[in-house]
C-alpha cells in the first residue's frame, strides 16, 4: 500500500479550479432507459471564495440521486461555504430543465496538505449529501452497495462540462485495482479518461448498486486521467462519514428532519 500512496501524489481533484472544462473522454453516450444515467445529475454550487469574502465561485460537478430528495456528490464540489446549489437531470445524454434547487448540504472535510495540495488519505471522506427543496417523483434513486473487499467490474457516469454549462452525460467501464482499509478504491477506466466536471459522478457495481463517487484522478497530464480514485458510499463509509450519510438517507426515507453541516438558501432555478 505504501507504493500506492506514493503513486497518489499525482492525483488531481476533479473539480480543481483553473483547469480546462472537459467531459469523459471516450466511453459511451448515456441511454434513455439506463437506470444509472437516469439517476445521474449535474450539480452546480455557488460558494464564497476562501481568499476573498466578497467573491463567489461557481463549481459544476456530477452527482447521483440516492433518495427522492437526496443527491450524493463529492465534498470538494460543494466547498466549505456553499451559498446555493441546484441539480439538473438528463434525458439520455442531454440536460433537461427545470433544475431542482437545494435546501441544504451535509459535507465532510477533505484536509489539505501543504506538500501535495490534498491529504489523500482523507479522500475516503470526500462525500457530500445535497438535500433538495422538493422530492423527485419521476426518477428512481440508486441503492447503496453493502459489499466489502475488492469489487468486480464497475461503471462510472459523469456529465462533464461544456463552456461552463452542464455537458454531455457519458459512462465508462472501470476495472478495480485496489481498495484501502477506509474503502477508498483505485480503478482504471477502460477506453476512456475521466475529467473535470465528472467529479462526484456515481460509480456502480455490476448489479447497479452505488459503490462510491469519483473523487480524483491520478495523472501526469491533467485535467483528465484513466486512474480514478473513488470515495466510498453506503456501507463502505467509516466513522462519522458513514454515520452521517446513512443517517441522512434513512431520515429522508422516513420523511424526518435532516441536520446538515451547512444550510443554504437558493431561488428557484
Image (spheres, helix red, strand yellow):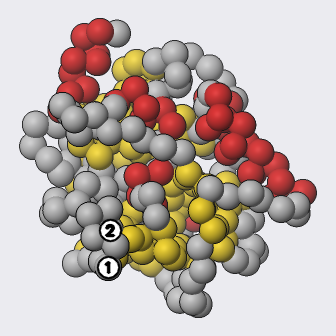
Residue 205 falls in image quadrant? top right
Q: Name the residue nearer the viewer: 32 or 261.
A: 261
- Which circle, 2 or 1, is nearer the viewer? 1
Q: Quadrant of residue 22?
A: bottom left
Q: Earlier in the sequence, mark 2 or mark 1?
A: 2
Disc on res. 91: none
Q: Is residue 125 above or below residue 156?
A: above
Point 48% across, 43% down: residue: 109
Q: Residue at x 60, y 80 (%)?
A: 265
Residue identifier under label 1:
54
Q: Is residue 144 above or below residue 43?
A: above
Residue 165 location (% of width, % of height): 32, 78
Mark 2 residue crowding within 10 angstroms, few (<14) / some (14–19) / many (20+): some
Helix, strand or loop under label 2? loop
Name above or below for residue 125 compared with residue 54. Answer: above
Where's residue 243, x and y in %? Answer: 72, 37
Residue closest to the eye, 244 or 166 = 244
Badge 2 vs badge 1, beta-carbon distance below 8 Å: yes
Judged from the image, the secondary structure of the residue bearing numbered disc 1 is loop
**Image quarter of residue 252:** bottom right
Judge whether residue 268 can be spotted in this image.
yes
The reply, left or right, for residue 254 in relation to residue 115 is right
Mark 1 residue crowding within 10 angstroms, few (<14) / some (14–19) / many (20+): few
For image coordinates 62% across by 37% down, the residue present is: 241
Measured as percent of width and height from the top left, residue 229 is found at 36, 35
**Residue 116 placement (x, y as % from top left):** 20, 33
Using the numbered discs, state the Cα–Cα distance from disc 2 to disc 1 in whole angstroms. 7 Å
Q: Quadrant of the N terminus?
A: top left
Residue under circle 2? 49
* Residue 145 appears in the picture as rendered: no
Amino acid at each position: 500500500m505504501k507504493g500506492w500512496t506514493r503513486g497518489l501524489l499525482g492525483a488531481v481533484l476533479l473539480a480543481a479550479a483553473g483547469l480546462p472544462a472537459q467531459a469523459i473522454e471516450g466511453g459511451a453516450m448515456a441511454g434513455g432507459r439506463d437506470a444509472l444515467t437516469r439517476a445521474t445529475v449535474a450539480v452546480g454550487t455557488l460558494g464564497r471564495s476562501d481568499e476573498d469574502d466578497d467573491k463567489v465561485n461557481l463549481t459544476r460537478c456530477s452527482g447521483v440521486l440516492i433518495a427522492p430528495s437526496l443527491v450524493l456528490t463529492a465534498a470538494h464540489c460543494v466547498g466549505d461555504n456553499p451559498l446555493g446549489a441546484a441539480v439538473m437531470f438528463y434525458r439520455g445524454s442531454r440536460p433537461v430543465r427545470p433544475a431542482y434547487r437545494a435546501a441544504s448540504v451535509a459535507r465532510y472535510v477533505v484536509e489539505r496538505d501543504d506538500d501535495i495540495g490534498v491529504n489523500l488519505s482523507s479522500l475516503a471522506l470526500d462525500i457530500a449529501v445535497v438535500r433538495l427543496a422538493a422530492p423527485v417523483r419521476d426518477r428512481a434513486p440508486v441503492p447503496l452497495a453493502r459489499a466489502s473487499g475488492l469489487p468486480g467490474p464497475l461503471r462510472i457516469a459523469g456529465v462533464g462540462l461544456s463552456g461552463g454549462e452542464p455537458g454531455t452525460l457519458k459512462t465508462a467501464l472501470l476495472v478495480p485495482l485496489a481498495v484501502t482499509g477506509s474503502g477508498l478504491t483505485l480503478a482504471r477506466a477502460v477506453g476512456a479518461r475521466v475529467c473535470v466536471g465528472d467529479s462526484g459522478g456515481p460509480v456502480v457495481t455490476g448489479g447497479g448498486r452505488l459503490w462510491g463517487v469519483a473523487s480524483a484522478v491520478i495523472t501526469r497530464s491533467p485535467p483528465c486521467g484513466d486512474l480514478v480514485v473513488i470515495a466510498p458510499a453506503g456501507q463502505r463509509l467509516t466513522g462519522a462519514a458513514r454515520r452521517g450519510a446513512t443517517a441522512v438517507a434513512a431520515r429522508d426515507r422516513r420523511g424526518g428532519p435532516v441536520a446538515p453541516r451547512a444550510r443554504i438558501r437558493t431561488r428557484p432555478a
